[in-house]
Image: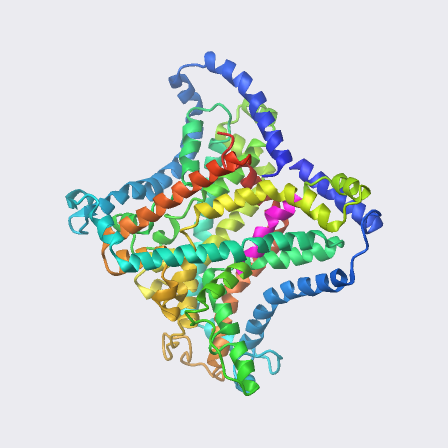
Amino acid sequence: MSTLTVAQEARRRARLDSGRPIWEEEPTLVGRLGKPLVLALIVLLVVFPMYVVVVTSLSSTEAVTRAGGLVVVPRELTIAAYVQLLSGGVVTRALIISTAITAIGTAFSLTITVLAAYGLSRPGSLWHRPLLFVVLLTFLFGPGIIPSYLMVNSLGLIDNYASLILPGAISAFNLIVMRAFFMGIPGELIDSGRIDGASEFGVLTRIVLPLSKAVVAVVGLFYAVGYWNAFFNAMLYLNDNTKWPLQMVLRTYIVQAQVLPSGAGGVTAMPGMDLAPAPSLAIKMAIVVIAIVPVLLVYPFIQRHFTKGVIIGAVKG
Amino acid sequence: MTTVDERRQTVEVKSAQAPEHRRKLQRPPWRHRLRQDWPLLLMVAPVIILLGLFHYLPTLGNVIAFQDYSPYAGVRGSEFIGFGNFQRMFGEPAFWKAFNNTLIITAFQLVFYFPVPIMMALLLNSVLSTKVRTMIQGIAYLPHFFSWVLVVSLFQQMIGGAGLLSQALRNNGLEAVDLMTRPDTFIVLVTAESIWKDAGWGMIVFLAALSTINPALYEAAAADGANRWRRLWHITLPGLRPVIVLLLILRLGDALTVGFEQFILQRSAVGGDAAEVLDTYVYFQGLLLGDFGYGAAAGLFKGVVGLVLVLAANKFAHLVGEQGVYSRS
């Protein structure tokens, strides 16, 4: 990795010092105008849809009606839609379920991934080659939808929240990334721990993990994003729609555009609420925003590290 | 991935092999090593058990593809019918429809999706300001972390029947269009969605490869009178070649997997004629219609063809002198 960053650094510094290398031609007019244009377009394509969705979710009924649908120019902002969604009903429940699944699933996946990555990272340990092979082989083929479903079914996990966690709890990719990182820790450190009488578990928790905060954070966040976004398992294994996580709610009400249930237990009109009813489009967009926000919150933390992580995985996987 | 790293790694592997070989000769018997290493094995156990339970056992469960499977009789009680399911499948026009759709969509994406991350990486790499570059990178990666449901929702709000585009057209006295439900342009839609979601992410690997190309090469080429296009052709592209080949191979291996979630989400809006791919076919035939053995056969067919494609593509990469995916073994 070090060569990579050193080369990168050197290039960056050279560029910063003198701007453009002296031997390089001045850009043509097309390049000078076209490049910023294309880059601005890329940024706009990502940012604009999110902007529209957020603004619409924050708009009042009148503003949405006046705009004839989605709102582009914000006027009369209100958080009525969020208040309504989060004061009980389908979305609140789905949000709680998704949050719980994400928290529990991430803790579980991260724990067993750390343990296995360490267990497979000690050179020359008993059977570590065949065990590693068992992990790597999963890259080559998947078991298929039907046999997986039958397996979950025969374990009695249909309509059980465990079906959202256990079948996809291990990402071989994350495991390999973490193992690669652990193997980069100098063996002398680990040996010194052993000489001082630490058990393997002690070495892992007291020496290896404190040195691996970055990779643990990245892998943990990858798992968390995965659990938060998971929709496939919920669709396959949960027949009971009162157990739906947020992504299923998103699909039902936004993609399939089914009508939001009103009345008690529904999204709108909770008893004893004297708020003006928020527009239904604003509510829909608020659901979209609620699904985006957690990703945006963790994103800055992952972003610093993931380039490195991905490249380690790609090189050694 | 990158040539420098790859080389460094092979060196490491070689130098590590020699002492290990010697160690092997005087290795204590496995019972002694078990006494020493059992905590490590215990640590690996949960992962192995989970993989066994949710990966390897279901893989074995594919035997029901050769059975007239009945959920009541189970795998043991169901009758073996040999290749009956496969024969039925190959005679089924709907299967071939899904198969064709899959291949056409994959080919289309290969041509129109695959170059986008490379071009974006080249463009971004040429930006001089580090700040601007980091900012644009951060924004370009972002959609990768959105779920497919979210991506489809956003597209629907932008270009769907009730979306922003239709809204703008209506406001200007034109007819609204719903680009989300048209079978004839569906292939463009799914490719656009894939590009929006993952092109920025795909860019990472190319950017990393670009940063390992020695800048002195460019300077030397420029001194020899090579203009920017010649430098691109003779230095940049050869520098990217191993990565491009690697990703092409991985893509070919996934040729029959065009993305279950993306298609299942849009199949009902667009109709099965355009949006049925092998994965959705397996889901509908196997799970929704309860024809488990038949669905498993279609899924197994997909898996085996995919495996053969990876192996063949990798072999081909070796023939043309590239590293491929698993050159080290």
Where is residue B62? Give x, y as percent: 27, 44
Q: Quick check: A88 left or right of B222?
A: left
Q: Is residue A218 above or below residue A124?
A: below
Asked if the stretch drawn in magenta spans residue A135, the answer is no
Where residue B35 sits: x, y (%)? 41, 21
Against B263, residue A286 (above or below) is below
Q: Start and end of the magenta stretch? A: B197-210
Residue B154, image x and y in percent?
A: 51, 68
Classify residue B233 as left or right of residue A209. Answer: right
Q: Image height check: is A226 above or below B314?
A: below
**Who's the residue at 72% across and 53% down the image?**
B126
Name the residue located 39 percent from the left edge and 41 percent from the top edge. Answer: B308
- Where residue A241 sits, quadrant-wise, is bottom left
Taken as a whole, is the magenta stretch helix, strand or loop? helix
**Residue B122 image point, x, y percent:** 67, 52
Residue sitting nearer the eye, B177 or A140: B177
Residue B200 part of the magenta-drawn span: yes
Q: Is residue A59 left or right of residue A271?
A: right
The answer to whether one can see residue B171 in this image is yes
- Taking depth in this image into account, of A58 and A72 the one nearest to the observer is A72
Establish if A139 lies above or below B264: above
Residue A245 appears anywhere in the view: no
Find residue A93 and report its image quarter.
bottom left
| Count of residue discs | 0
